[in-house]
Image (spheres, helix red, strand yellow):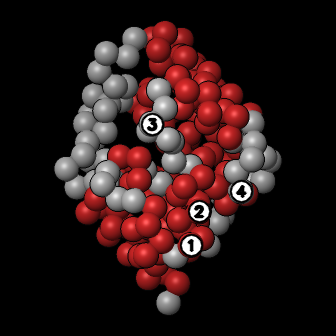
Amino acid sequence: MQSLMVLKAADFAAHMHREQRRKGSEASPYINHPITVALLIAEVGGIDKPEVLAAALLHDTVEDTDATLDDIETHFGAEVRLLVDQVSDNKMLTKAERKQQQIEHAASISDDAVLIKLADKIANISDIVKSPPAGWDMARRLEYLDWSESVVNNCKDINVPLKNKFYEVLSASRAALAG
């Protein structure tokens, strides 16, 4: 049963992120973010591949929890591990290096990883407007939008609906911030 993998990934991600909150002013439970990413891939992108949806649910677990890539592979297989690895930042690098690496790396990730990257950026830029992190002034929020655009511009064009949704949300976010 393929949907079982997706449900197990949701359960694993919820457990791993159980004590985390998003940085935004609403401080929503962190698990809401990976669920949104998976929903965007399914609803907007039209993708129902269990490995992609599972990896979307797990995309931040290696970066932000004690989960390891080996844990991901043990529970979800090599393909999900590879996808999570492709969209995870190397926390050994400085923040500036990680941001630059995301831009450069976006061009070489797999088509399935691009889906996760696009949906993640859509969700994040939506949150920047709706519930910005504390201490993020307008300049920092606009800088995040510009950086996200640089990452997405470097992604392969493999899913027109998701890419169009990104630019639609980006435009609406810039307009909202311009006020």
Mark 2 — residue?
82
User: Which residue is at a point 44% across and 67% down the rendered structure image?
Assistant: 70
Q: Dot 4: few (<14), some (14–19), or many (≥20) neighbours within 10 Å? A: some
**Marks 3,4: beta carbons within 8 A:** no
Q: Dot 2: few (<14), some (14–19), or many (≥20) neighbours within 10 Å? A: some
Mark 1 — residue?
78
* Secondary structure of the residue carrying numbered label 4: loop
- Residue 16, compared with residue 156, is above or below; it is below
* Secondary structure of the residue carrying numbered label 3: loop
Amino acid type, label 3? Met
Which numbered dot is residue 110? 4
Q: Nearer the viewer, mark 3 or mark 2?
A: 3
Q: Dot 3: few (<14), some (14–19), or many (≥20) neighbours within 10 Å? A: few
Amino acid type, label 4? Ser
Q: Hey, which residue is sitting farthest left in the picture?
A: 19
The disc, 1 or 4, on the residue closer to the chain's N-terminal end is 1
Give the alpha-carbon distance from disc 3 to disc 2, as whole Å. Answer: 19 Å
Q: Nearer the viewer, mark 1 or mark 4?
A: 1
Q: Nearer the viewer, mark 3 or mark 4?
A: 3
Mark 3 — residue?
92
Q: Nearer the viewer, mark 3 or mark 1?
A: 3
